[in-house]
Every structure is written in structure tokens, then in C-alpha cells.
Amino acid sequence: MTLEEIARLAGVSRSTVSRVVNGDRRVSEAARARVQDVIARHHYHPHAAARSLASRRTRVLGLLVSQSVGGLFTDPFYPILVQGTADACNAADHNLTMLMDTSQDGSAVEQLYQRVIRGRHVDGLILACHAVDDPLVPRLQEDRIPFVLVGRHPGAAVSFVDVDSHAAAREAVAHLLAHGRRRVAMICGPPNLIAAIDRHAGYVTALQEAGVPPEPSRVVFTDFTQRGGYRAMQGLLHERDHSLDAVFAASDALAFGAMAAIQERGLRIPDDIAVMGFDGLAEGADSQPPLSTVTQPVADLGREAVRALLALIERPDGAPLQRFLPTRLTPRRSCGCALASIEGRRGGAEPAFALSIA
């Protein structure tokens, strides 16, 4: 079916059909309804290439995660983010394309930039998990390519969607301190990532406000993986000779790894060492003991990034769009919450849980 045939059946001009198909608002509601009715009855789908030529838009958005492909597929944070991004693209009648760096030296990103991004095969870009000195940010600005960060930028006036990681981490560590813990360690992400920097700052602030001197030896920076958390916790237990009484992990994946290392040493959670994570992954509710964590709206970060990017594409000269989404503290058994009530119902202390790292 062609635009001419739709126009004849709907009793409108071809240009009116074209405007409806391309989302142009300069069409009366009555004419739009007739055209959409014909399109629905005849299952019409516009030709993508022709549509792009007419609108100068691809209706494709890119999602680039600035880390190894291995991390993308092993960190449970990213599938949730991708799902939220894809949902928003589908709702807006756009396609989502994943852009992944498969190189060790970043050369693949350069190829992607020249071939896909600068070649305008996408209308805009969502950039997730970016580093402080990410070279893509100034290049995107210089080339006037619409983009939105998932995670704030510390200096540039750019559009982003994020959570207040500093405030959320501060609240999480303050919660551990309220349980009487004073020797609180932290397993953090890579030191050049914004989220890791903000969560570490929140950890330090909470300790200082409680009058507990921060000890750099109790902080380990590693990659945001379960194995990274496991190895970091092993190091902390060895170096501190079991003197820790709590650990704040900058992600739930890190917390799961830390829990496995603690159990491997024959220590109990939370009796010997309390554990707090960050993300609010569903797996945390099913761990034994259930993981206390900061719950952030991961899927909504993807959805809001798409909405912001579409707004930037429509208004390329508009001011940067910056939004923080809310988090909430989710206390469970691993930090010591509800311990008395659980033991009372079961008639004694819970057995030690078991997690393993393959």
C-alpha cells in the first residue's frame, strides 16, 4: 500500500498522510483519525529508508556502554537498564541499537564513532557508565550530536539522568553506623567512574559525621562485578584480620561477592560482619540472608534517558536536561534489621548462608 492509496481511502491529500506518518502536528484531529484508521485496517508500515529521507531522521537511538563487553553481559545492572531503554524506544516508535566496545585499547569506540555516530546512523546517543575523562563527551558536543548521559557529569553542562549517589551512599553507611558498627569497610567501583566517586564520597561523609575517622586501608576499588567483590573482600579479611564489622558495597553485584567471601571464612552475616549493597536487584531479596541495599530505579533511568534524548532531538538548541531520580533505603537481614523478630519466629538464630563464586 502506498501513501496515495491511503490518501484516497481516507479522503485526504498525500501530504496529509505524510504528515501523519511522520508525526507532524499540522493535521486536524479528524483527518489524523481517518488516516490512522486506514493505516490500522490495512496494516501499513512506512518504508524506513523513504521515511528517513523525508524526515532526515533515522528514528534510531544508540546506547553505548563505556566498558568491556564482558561487563555488559555479567553485571545484572545493565540488562535492566537496557530493558527500560528499549521499552521507552518502542513506546516512542523508535529503534534501539547497542554500541559495544570490543577492543582493549578503545579503538572500537573510535570506529563506532566515525562509522555510526558521526555518520548519523543514529539520531542521538545514550551514554552509560562513563568515566570522568570520557573523551566522547567533548566530541559529541563539538559535532552537535544529541546525547544524554546515564550518570551525571562533574564539569560539563550536559544532559543527564542519574540518582544522587552521594546522598544515597551516605544514608546507607549511616544506617550501618546506627546498628553500632564502627569498623566499616567499602568495596567501591573503578575510581574513574562517576558513580564510584560519588558513592565513595557518601561513605566518607557518613563516617565523618559520626565521628569515625575514615581509614583508606578499608577501601578497595575494583570492577563492578561479583568476582571483583569476592576478591576485594578476601583482601580486606586478610589485611584486617577479621577486625571489620561491616562493609558497604557500591553495587549489589559487589555485595554478593563480598557475602561469598565472608561465608567462606566461616563468618556470619550480620552477626560478625553486616553487609549493605547498592542497586536493589531482585536477586538480593532471595539471598540468604536477604541483602540490605539502596534501591535505585534502574529501568526508569533508561526510560528517562530516552525521553530526554527525544526532547533534545526536537529542540537541539535547548538548555541541557538534568534530572535526578529518587532512591530508597531497603533494609533487610544482612545489615541486622529484623534480626530479633526473625529469630523469635524460628526459635533461634538462622544458619549461615552459602554463596559460591565459580
Image (cartoon, rainbow, N blue to C red):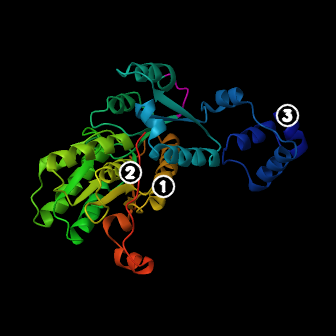
| Residue at position x 35%, y 74% in the image | 339
Count neighbours of disc 2 (C-alpha within 10 A) and say few if under 14, some if 14 to 19, many if 20 or more: many
Label 1, secondary structure: give it.
helix
Is 117 on the left or on the right of 31, as rendered? left
Viewer-closest of 319 and 273: 273
Residue 82 visible in the displayed image? yes
- Amino acid type for the residue under numbered disc 2: Phe
Q: x and y percent of residue 195 in the render?
A: 31, 47
Q: Residue at x 54, y 45 (%)?
A: 85
Residues at marks 3 and 2 touching, judged by CB atoms closer than 8 Å: no
Nearer the viewer's eye, disc 3 or disc 2? 2
Instruction: Give percent across and percent down for residue 250.
Output: 31, 50
Residue 153 visible to the viewer: no
Instruction: Name the residue tied to disc 3.
Output: 4
| Residue bearing mark 1 | 283
Residue interval drawn in magenta: 119-123
271 and 66: which is toward the camera: 271
Task: Give the residue displayed 41% in from the left and 49% down from the top.
Answer: 321
Point out residue 139 in the picture as x, y percentages from the top left corner: 36, 28
Is 52 in the magenta?
no
Disc nearer the start of the sequence (1/3): 3
Distance of label 1 from label 3 (alpha carbons) = 54 Å
> How many angstroms separate mark 2 from mark 1 (CA)?
9 Å
User: Which labelled disc corresponds to residue 325?
Assistant: none
Amino acid type at image mark 3: Glu
Going by the numbered disc 1, the residue's amino acid type is: Glu
